[in-house]
Image (spheres, coloured by chain):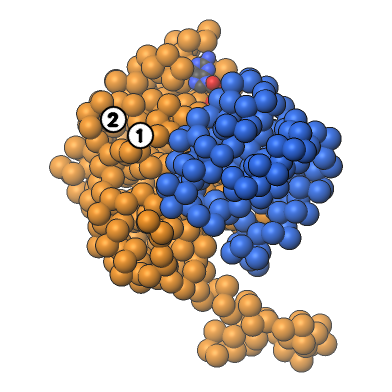
Chain colours: A orange, B blue
Amino acid sequence: MRVSNDPKDLIKRVRRGDHAAASRALSLVVDENAAGEPLARDFFKSAGTVQKVGVCGPPGAGKSTLTGRLIGHYRSLKRKVGVLAVDPSSSISGGAFLGDRLRIMEHATDPGVFIRSLASRGMIGGLTHTIFGAIHVLEALGCDKIIVETVGTGQDEVDIASVVDTVLYVTTPAMGDEIQAMKAGAMEVGDVFVVNKADLAGKDKAVGDLKGALALGHGAGQAVKAWESPVVATAALSGEGVAQLAKLVDEHWTHLKKSGEGRKRLKRQHATELQFWVHRHVVKNALGRVTDKDLDDMVTRKTDPATLGRKLLQS
Amino acid sequence: MDKPFRILIAKPGLDGHDRGAKVIVRALRDAGFEVIYTGIRQTPEMIATAAMQEDVDAVGLSLLSGAHLTLFPEICRHLKKKGLKTVLVFGGGIIPDEDAAALRKAGIDRVFGPGTPLQTIVDYLKEKLPVAR
Ligand SMILES: Nc1nc2c(ncn2[C@@H]2O[C@H](COP(=O)(O)OP(=O)(O)O)[C@@H](O)[C@H]2O)c(=O)[nH]1
Ligand SMILES: [Mg+2]
């Protein structure tokens, strides 16, 4: 059963639920291979059909361990789960250490689970430019839930909230100071806040601090929000609190579908995907055509950035 | 820029030490590879599934306990079963020369003994992988 790169064949196999084909399709899409484009067009037809859950927060908070637990929960309900775990690429070597899988090994050979590690490949923050294409492969594969794990604390220009439907923001009792100092961006990013490692000392204080910080966010006189981000404590190692977390994730999905918010978010996701696409094709392409002579011409004032820029965009 | 090659580093067998594997993981990352590490006590099926889902270019197996003659070929069989016929498989550990030949027949491209300089492994992959792709 060799996996070919023939687009028609790959599309058919992915839509039949073939993991090997999905894996190859993912490579073509995230490598921005020309052969990936017909696939991406087809897979986009399945976009937005299932809930995409983002798991973000600082390194070491237990995101991967928690992802493993959520997989276990969904598998007990016979749902198929797809996971994309993004880790940063080294800006010096271009290499990356992709270690999230290590914490999800319990489900390593479960045919209802597909896990792919992705490197950020030059993108600042916890994401990668091809994340949407990767998500669409998993949507076409027939996953019932898609989990995207990224580092990230809501301070990046494009964050996980523009990519998924429901964002879980994971912290721990040990990160108390960080919770106190949490910036507005972080507070807005989370749809559900998780205090993981609830087995450690200081759980109640962390939960209280988070609730306090969230309450500050919507002071007196503001309209009551349709969704107030809840705070839940979990111990991912033992599994404590995971069922409650999963329940909140379901409730958020129901909220998105019932209110107009789900459609609004989908539109924002597609806008961001388009932004990435144009950036990759237009900006990269134009800058790729800048020659050393162009740079010299600017130094000698024969041209200037605006003139040169217009020329590059028109050609 | 060319896309980085992807490599799975896995530790089959029962021994619980993975310092050696982690050193290789870091060296490969610093040499520009995307390295997936799946930890200790991996069964052949776990390794093959990870290699398939991650669509890696190479699989590196690290093993201290002397079970390489049974485990390494079994892993190669599982890889083939998953359709991964061209993935480059290499191994490291305490492996006698006479076993290395048998392993090569089973599909392990190269075996690195203890104390192999990390640069040797990096150079080997940089030379082999572009040809394979
Ligand atoms: N005590 C405790 N440790 C945990 C818990 N969840 C995860 N960890 C540990 O925290 C470390 C980092 O976990 P990981 O899932 O890799 O975090 P990530 O970097 O956020 O993905 C690992 O050593 C985990 O075993 C928990 O609920 N309690
Ligand atoms: Mg992680």
Amino acid tagged 2: Arg
Q: Position of residue A211 (x, y in %)?
A: 40, 21
- Of badges 2 and 1, the one in the foreground is 1
Q: Quadrant of residue A8?
A: bottom left
Q: Give SS at disc 2.
A: helix
Dots 2 and 1 on the same chain: yes
Q: Nearer the viewer, residue A37 or B28?
A: B28
Q: Nearer the viewer, residue A50 or B29?
A: B29
Q: Residue furthest top?
A: A201
**Residue A158 visible here:** no
Q: Residue at x 34, y 60 (%)?
A: A270
Q: Residue at x 29, y 20 (%)?
A: A244
Q: Residue at x 41, y 59 (%)?
A: A2
Chain where mark 1 sits: A
Pointer 1: what residue? Answer: A110
Q: Position of residue A141 (x, y in %)?
A: 30, 52
Q: Nearer the viewer, residue B112 or A308?
A: B112
Q: Give SS at disc 1.
A: loop
Up the image or down, B11 lies above or below A89; here it is: above
Q: How many marks?
A: 2
Q: Tell whether label 1 touches label 2 (CB within 8 Å).
A: yes
Q: Residue furthest left?
A: A258
Up the image or down, B9 lies above or below A220; here it is: below
Pointer 2: what residue? Answer: A75
Q: Position of residue A299 (x, y in %)?
A: 81, 83
Amino acid tagged 1: Asp
**Residue A115 visible here:** yes
Quick one: label 2, few (<14), some, or many (20+) residues within 10 Å? some
Tell me the quadrant of the picture where the C terminus of chain B can be found: bottom right
Q: Quadrant of residue A41?
A: bottom left
In whole angstroms, how far apart are the C-alphas of marks 2 and 1?
A: 9 Å
Up the image or down, A51 lies above or below A200; here it is: below
